[in-house]
Amino acid sequence: MIDFDKLDKTIHERGRLSIMTALATRMEWSFQDLKAALKMSDGNLITHLRALYKAGYVSMAKEVKGRPQTKYALTPAGKRAFEEYIAILERIVDLGRG
């Protein structure tokens, strides 16, 4: 039996799961690229990014090359947390196939 309390509640919210999944696909994303890819509003995206940053799952770096940009990436802790989250989901799916 799976203990659903082990699902990371920070990641489990749909918007944050989308962000974590996108960040897992490449080294870094700019705010604007994440916004476009995930079809999220500025306010919604920044709220979720702040929650992930506060949890230590996401790093943030500001770049000033012409127009300022903020880039986001998974931290090592974020990568581990995401991998653990996916592993729990895989166990749940396997039980369903049982």
Image: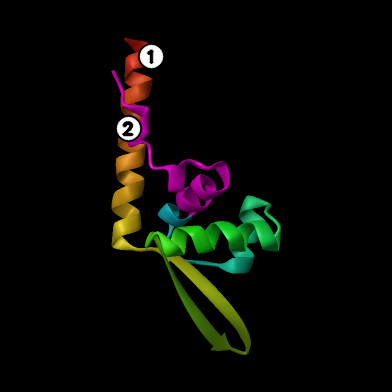
Circle nearer the N terminus (2, 1): 2
- Name the side, left or right, on which 75 lies relative to 54: left
Q: Tell me if residue 15 is in the magenta stretch.
A: yes
Please state the horizontal and vertical placement of residue 18, each as a whole percent of the image: 53, 47
In the image, residue 98 sits, relative to residue 66, either above or below, namely above
Q: Which residue is mark 1?
A: 96
Look at the image and tell me in which quarter the C terminus lies: top left
Does residue 85 show up?
yes
Q: Secondary structure at mark 2?
A: helix
Circle 1: is it few (<14), some (14-19), or many (20+) Cα within 10 Å? Answer: few
Name the residue: 35% across, 40% down.
85
In space, the residues marked 2 and 1 are separated at their CA atoms by 13 Å
Q: Nearer the viewer, residue 53 or 89?
A: 53
Look at the image and tell me in which quarter the N terminus lies: top left
**For residue 70, which quarter of the picture?**
bottom right
- Name the side, left or right, on which 98 lies relative to 54: left
Q: Nearer the viewer, residue 60 or 33?
A: 60
Name the residue: 31% across, 44% down.
83
In the image, residue 85 sits, relative to residue 30, either above or below, namely above
**What amino acid type should be assigned to the residue bearing mark 1?**
Gly
Name the residue: 31% across, 26% down.
3
Q: Which stretch appears magenta?
A: 1-22
Residue 88 image label = 2
In the image, residue 20 sits, relative to residue 97, either above or below, namely below
Please state the horizontal and vertical placement of residue 43, each as a whole percent of the image: 68, 61
**For residue 37, which quarter of the picture?**
bottom right
Please state the horizontal and vertical placement of residue 55, each as a whole percent of the image: 40, 59
